[in-house]
Amino acid sequence: MDTLRGQLDRLIIVSGLASVELGVLPVAQPSPVMPLAGFSLHDEDVVFVETLTGEQILQDPGEVMAYLAMFNLLQEAAATGADAVALIHQAVARLP
């Protein structure tokens, strides 16, 4: 649990950086979409999708737009700023 506490504390610290926007999806709220794999968008031109066996690089505009739309839905549902930090503090308080 010490490692998890440290990770959550680090998120709180990083959330205060001007160059970071931290979003937390509340567990008690249904997610608007369910990504089947981790992904990262780069300049709306390419998506890197993490799969079980490696990484896919998607550059087809239609595929990129689908991931961008999913990201926007997740971003809209996420708590940010003080609300995100409050959720992290609540998670820490529930740890044994």
Image: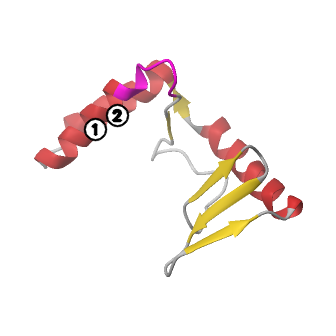
Residue found 52% across the figure and 27% down from its top: 80
Is 42 placed left or right of 63 in the picture?
A: left
State the predominant SS element of the stretch in magenta. loop
Of all residues, the one furthest to the bottom in this rendering is 53
Figure check: 33 above or below 37: above
Q: Which colour style is shown?
A: secondary structure
The residue carrying mark 1 is: 8
Q: Which residues are magenta?
A: 14-20
Q: Position of residue 9 (x, y in %)?
A: 25, 32
> At label 2, which amino acid type do we have?
Leu
The residue carrying mark 2 is: 11
Q: Secondary structure at mark 1?
A: helix
Q: Nearer the viewer, residue 40 or 33?
A: 40
Answer yes or no: do the residues labelled 2 and 1 have beta carbons within 8 Å?
yes
Q: Is residue 17 magenta?
A: yes
Q: Which mark is residue 87?
A: none
Q: Quadrant of residue 67?
A: bottom right
Q: Residues within 10 Å of mark 2 (few under 14, many from 20)?
A: some
